[in-house]
Image (tube, rainbow, N blue to C red):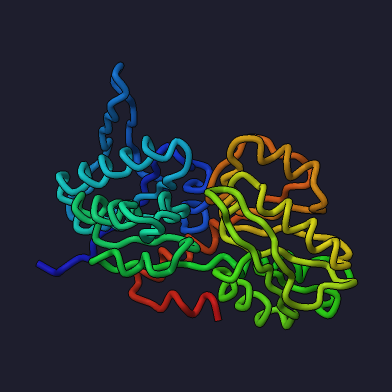
């Protein structure tokens, strides 16, 4: 009897079904059928409504707010597919929660990013596909293959489609020393200058700008980061850049967490525009926000993984 290649199936958790639907449209496959509910005490209940025996399963789930609920949901889904005899289980996590807890900053701190990687691996995942990890060393926390995709191509496309775009009028700004590699990558791809904000963090979610390294005078400053959480750091960064003569400030980040009063804080700041992607869903955002779609990038990466093709070529 001739060997037939396993069928590919894409399933979505409840964290970001719209992104999963867009991915399935691009990949030209239908979303798998699955019933997801909760018992009265909050326990996750999952029933796979179609066979996955011997199939290559891809599960899409961002571990965004509510982080713990979405994480537990992901683990239960992996376990369900494992017990249903899937040939392989690849987990697509556009936003990897707990990524900021990647090291011991103080004595007796947990390294929760490693704990989460252990949970995903032990649950039965064979591969992880994620996007712009907060700390690249998290890749080493996994004992299974991990593809850490990069979002900068969608931001480059946005700026290049702007009317009368001229790279000489822009400068890419890293919001801190730790983000220099990320910002430099964008600056080199777009042939722009690079500046760096020197800041210190007296406590969590609080940042103080100490100095601006680089020339931003008379330039459109692109603040490029991976996460916008409370927005406080961005607001302070914009004030520092404007004080140094920047024409305006455009904030760009892959993951728009936008917790607490972040939207209102950014709306009443010196920031002209905020660009985020749809790794984390939001119902409604003010006009100053633009949400860029990553479904084509994620979908193409999944198809390449499926065909054993290079994924890194997407970012060259």
Q: Residue at x 73, y 37 (%)?
A: 264
Q: Is residue 26 above or below residue 20?
A: below
Q: Is residue 61 left or right of residue 26?
A: left
Residue 50 occupies which quadrant of the picture?
Answer: top left
In this rendered view, identify the residue nearer to me: 125 or 259: 259
Q: Which quarter of the figure is the C terminus placed in?
A: bottom right
Residue lying farthest to the left in this orientation: 1
Q: Residue at x 41, y 66 (%)?
A: 303
In this rendering, does residue 55 appear at all?
no
Q: Residue at x 66, y 68 (%)?
A: 198
Q: Is residue 191 left or right of residue 148?
A: right
Q: How many numbered badges does the structure rendering display?
A: 0
In this rendering, does residue 98 appear at all?
yes
Residue 99 occupies which quadrant of the picture?
Answer: bottom left
The percent coordinates of residue 140 (x first, y second) are 31, 69
Q: Is residue 282 above or below residue 36?
A: below
Q: Which quarter of the figure is the N terminus placed in?
A: bottom left
Q: Is residue 94 left or right of residue 316?
A: left
The percent coordinates of residue 141 (x first, y second) are 29, 64
The percent coordinates of residue 136 (x first, y second) are 43, 69
In this rendered view, identify the residue nearer to me: 254 or 229: 229
In this rendered view, identify the residue nearer to me: 300 or 158: 158
Q: Residue at x 80, y 47 (%)?
A: 269
The percent coordinates of residue 145 (x first, y second) are 29, 68
Q: Is residue 79 above or below residue 154?
A: above
């Amino acid at each position: 009897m001739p060997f037939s290649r396993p069928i590919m199936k894409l399933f979505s958790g409840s964290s970001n079904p719209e992104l999963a639907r867009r991915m399935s449209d691009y990949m030209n496959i239908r979303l798998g059928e699955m019933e997801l509910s909760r018992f009265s005490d909050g326990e996750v209940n999952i029933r796979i409504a179609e066979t996955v025996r011997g199939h290559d399963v891809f599960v899409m789930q961002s571990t965004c707010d509510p982080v713990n609920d979405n994480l537990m949901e992901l683990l239960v889904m992996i376990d369900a597919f494992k017990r249903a005899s899937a040939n392989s289980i690849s987990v697509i996590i556009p936003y990897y929660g707990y990524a900021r807890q990647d090291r011991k900053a103080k004595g007796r701190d947990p390294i929760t990013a490693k704990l989460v990687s252990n949970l995903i691996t032990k649950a039965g995942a064979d591969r992880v596909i994620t996007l712009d990890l907060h700390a690249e060393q998290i890749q080493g926390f996994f004992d299974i293959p991990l593809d850490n995709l990069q979002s900068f191509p969608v931001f480059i496309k946005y700026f290049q489609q702007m009317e009368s775009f001229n790279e000489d009028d822009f400068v890419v700004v890293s919001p801190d020393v730790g983000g220099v590699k990320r910002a430099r990558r964008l600056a080199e791809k777009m042939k722009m200058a690079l500046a760096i904000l020197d800041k210190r963090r007296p406590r969590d979610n609080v940042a103080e700008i100490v100095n601006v390294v680089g020339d931003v005078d008379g330039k459109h400053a692109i603040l490029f980061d991976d996460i916008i959480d409370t927005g406080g750091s961005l607001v302070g960064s914009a004030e520092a850049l404007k004080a140094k003569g920047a024409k305006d400030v455009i904030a760009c980040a892959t993951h728009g967490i936008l917790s607490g009063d972040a939207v209102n804080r950014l709306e009443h700041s010196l920031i002209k525009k905020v660009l985020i992607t749809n790794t984390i869903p939001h119902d409604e955002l003010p006009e100053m926000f633009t949400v860029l779609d990553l479904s084509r990038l994620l979908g193409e990466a999944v198809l390449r993984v499926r065909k054993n093709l290079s994924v890194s070529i997407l970012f060259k």
